[in-house]
Each structure stands twice: as structure tokens, then as C-alpha cells.
Image: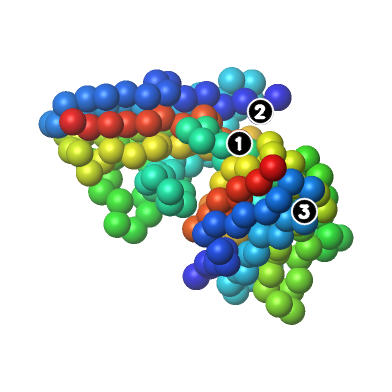
Amino acid sequence: GAVVSQHPSWVICKSGTSVKIECRSLDFQATTMFWYRQFPKQSLMLMATSNEGSKATYEQGVEKDKFLINHASLTLSTLTVTSAHPEDSSFYICSATKTTGTYYSYNEQFFGPGTRLTVL
Amino acid sequence: AQSVTQLGSHVSVSEGALVLLRCNYSSSVPPYLFWYVQYPNQGLQLLLKYTTGATLVKGINGFEAEFKKSETSFHLTKPSAHMSDAAEYFCAVSDRNQGGKLIFGQGTELSVKP
């Protein structure tokens, strides 16, 4: 159990267009989902945390109007890159947890396979 | 604020040799610590984690790590490297007060020579 999928696995788009990436928890309900960005040969940088039914919390330096996150159900979160530009080209990875972590217990993040975005 | 430092962006070992990937962390509260592996163009797979209890943690594929509070370290080891271990490895820390948010190290690319 605890499988997370992402769609599409790769996408190429023209500069100025918007791209939507889906993250789904296939066999569990995900209270919290995280979106990461990874540049080639670099680490993962957390972009935002989303909880079902509430607004996403963005990390410092991440433009919330450019990277729209929607967590409309317990199994689906979407990341929309609006007016994409070549510098947005990256590997986007989502993760999901079954419940919200607390001080006394940690809930493992299950990672999706990633989506490679190339903006021409 | 939390941070993670992985010493060595690239480690190369011979097949059958000991694997040692270094990770040091900074955290103001007792941390949760993790090692993940990433194969090219794939997501992350959890190798092992430390939350509480025994400081020597055993994970999948023969890997283990030891939490040393006095040294603020969580180094990853494997007694004998296999060719299939070649991948990118990430150490990560989570602040118990932040609901599971992970901070990743820079990553270490492990190469295994035949």
C-alpha cells in the first residue's frame, strides 16, 4: 500500500502556457501533500504544503500566483504552473502522508515518481 | 532553522567494498532523520528512518545508519556495495513541530565500480 502517482510523467510546453500536474494517492487518503522541485543534479526543494480543503502553505521565495496548488480531495492535489517560462523547467515531485504528523509521531511521506517539465 | 549537510557530492566505491555516506544535521529540537535513494528520473524511495528508540537503524537493501546526537550525525553505511546501489542518496531531517516537512541535504551520488 501507499502508492502515489503523478500525471503526466513528462510534459513539454511552449513559453507562456500553463501546465497542470496531478498527484494522486492511489490506495490511501492523503491528509497532507507536499510539492517539491528538483533541478538537475541538485536536491529537492520544498515548494509548498497542502492540506485537503484548505489553502496551500508556500515556502519563502515561491510565487503562489505562479505555482497554483489545489488539494480538493483526500486523494488528489494539483500543481499548475501558470505562464510557464524556460526557467520553470524542472523535475516536480509530490509526496503524500496518510495523516498529519505530530510532535510525538511522524507520518511517512510517500513520494510520487515525478514529472519532468520542459518549457521551450 | 533546520539544515542538513552531506559531505561529498560524489562517492565512488568498488563492488564489495564498504559504503559510507556522511550526513550531519542541525536542529533545535529532537529531529526525525531519513535516508532516501533516487534512481535517475524517478521519485524517492525511503531507505530508513530514525524517529525514536534505538539509535542504530536498519533499512532496506542492507543499509543501516546510526543516530549520534553528540556528533549531530546520521551516516549511512552498507558493508558490501552492489552494482545496483549506484544512485543518488539524500539525507533529510524533519522538525517535529512542522507537521512532517522535510529538509533535504544536497545529495550524494554513489558510483560502484566492478
Q: Chain of mark 3?
A: B
Residue type at the position of mark 3: Ala
Image coords of residue B14 (percent x, y): 71, 50
**In front of the other: label 3 or label 1?**
3
The residue depicted at 46 percent of the width and 37 percent of the height is: A93
Give me the disc on residue A2: 2
- Residue identifier under label 3: B17
Question: Relative to the observer, which residue lies in front, B39 or B36?
Answer: B39
**In this image, B17 relative to A23: left or right?**
right
Question: Measured along the vertical axis of the image, is residue A23 above or below residue A54?
Answer: above
Question: Looking at this rendering, what residue extends furthest in the front direction?
Answer: B114
Q: What is the distance, in whole Å, between disc 2 and disc 1 at their CAs? A: 7 Å
Of all residues, the one furthest to the right in this rendering is B54
| Rendering quarter of residue B66 | bottom right
- Marks 2 & 1 on one chain: yes
Query: Residue B1 at x, y = what percent?
Result: 50, 70
Drawn side of residue A114 relative to residue B12, left or right:
left
C-alpha span from label 2 to label 3: 33 Å
Which mark is in front, 2 or 3? 3
Please give the residue where the numbered disc 1 appears in the rendered image: A110
Q: Amino acid at mark 1?
A: Phe
- The residue closer to the viewer here, B9 or A24, is B9
Q: Chain of mark 1?
A: A
Q: Residue at x 28, y 38 (%)?
A: A89
- Are dots 2 and 1 in contact, CB under 8 Å? yes
Q: Which of the two discs, 2 and 1, labels the residue nearer the N terminus?
A: 2
Residue at the image point whose x is 37% and y is 46% from the top: A39
Q: Residue at x 32, y 24 (%)?
A: A11
Residue B66 badge: none
